[in-house]
Image (spheres, grey):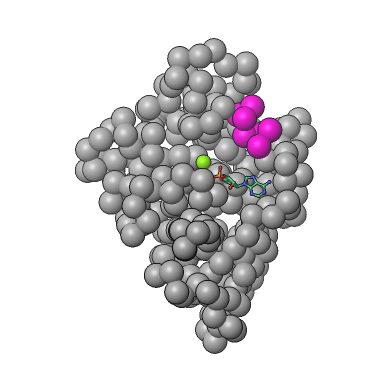
Amino acid sequence: MFDGAVSEEISMEDETNRVKTGIPGFDELCGGGLIRDRTYLISGTSGAGKTNFSIQFIYNGITKYGENGIIVATEERPEQIRENVLKFGWDLQALEDENKLVIIDACSTKIGIPSQEKYVDVRPFDIRSMMDQIIATQEEINAKRALVDSTTSVSFYLQDPAKIRIELLKLSTTLEVIGLTSMMTCELIDESKPSRFGVENFVTDGTIVLYYKRHENVRMRSMEIYKMRGSDHSKKIHPYDITPGGFVIHPHEEVYSMF
Ligand SMILES: Nc1ncnc2c1ncn2[C@@H]1O[C@H](COP(=O)(O)OP(=O)(O)O)[C@@H](O)[C@H]1O
Ligand SMILES: [Mg+2]
């Protein structure tokens, strides 16, 4: 199912300009890392690994590169997120206690339950309110990275693709202007399209698609850099594993027979 070595030359940029995800195998697929102060869409079906992949970017940012982070959680309560990723050895609570990480609870109010969290978005369907919270938090902890997980619940509320496009453009532009390199997740139902409402990928500078495809009687995990403005990047589909330590991408192998 995997090809051998990938004979693909990807030009490396001056690495000091790049924001490293630190996710094994990923940065070398896009010239040494993400471009600073840009926004990236992480698309995939449910269970593909969007949340874990993006949290690894935030966690590595703090622990390996000294860049503080913000997570806006619209789909899962912060408590669940902390518990889930602790299995990878990522202690988010410890980073929050050191004021290196803030998790904004944009989930509890949405589903009508009280929140014990310090940071709560009480108007979770309002992009303006989300942006105000992010701006205030960014100033508070001098964050350099952010994650909005996910764009899909906000998009369902807005419904109209034209409105979704303009609201997400406001969000991604605001994140960029205030100096955040960000990931926003997007839940797919159809893996042949890079976004759910057909517009989310237009307002971000890059799109990374995580696939979780069935091949005969097993599901295979693979990923593709679908778009990355301003950077050379791999055009191939690479397998990855979710290991006890998190994501590991195999940059020198490619998946070909499933597509
Ligand atoms: N410790 C682990 N080891 C291996 N795989 C895991 C582990 N924890 C979660 N997973 C996998 O990750 C999937 C969930 O990833 P997640 O990032 O929450 O997906 P998404 O956000 O795309 O819905 C699970 O369905 C499971 O297959
Ligand atoms: Mg998720």
Q: Residue at x 48, y 56 (%)?
A: 212
Q: Is residue 94 left or right of residue 162?
A: right
Q: Main secondary structure of the magenta part?
A: helix
Whether the magenta-drawn stretch holds residue 72 is answered as: no
Residue 178 seen anywhere in this rendered image of the structure: no
Q: Nearer the viewer, residue 81 or 126?
A: 81
Question: Residue visible at 55% across and 76% down?
Answer: 2
Q: Nearer the viewer, residue 152 or 259?
A: 259
Q: Nearer the viewer, residue 33 or 134?
A: 33
Percent x, y of residue 181: 54, 52
Query: As drawn, is 90 to the left or to the right of 28?
Result: right
Residue 19 figure quarter: bottom right
Q: Which residue: 22% across, 43% down?
A: 162
Q: Position of residue 150 (x, y in %)?
A: 45, 39
Q: Position of residue 146 (x, y in %)?
A: 56, 44
The stretch of residues the image draws in magenta is: 78-84
Percent position of residue 22, x then y: 67, 60
Report if residue 44 is visible in the image: yes
Q: Quadrant of the C terminus?
A: bottom left
Judged left or right of residue 198, residue 5 is: right
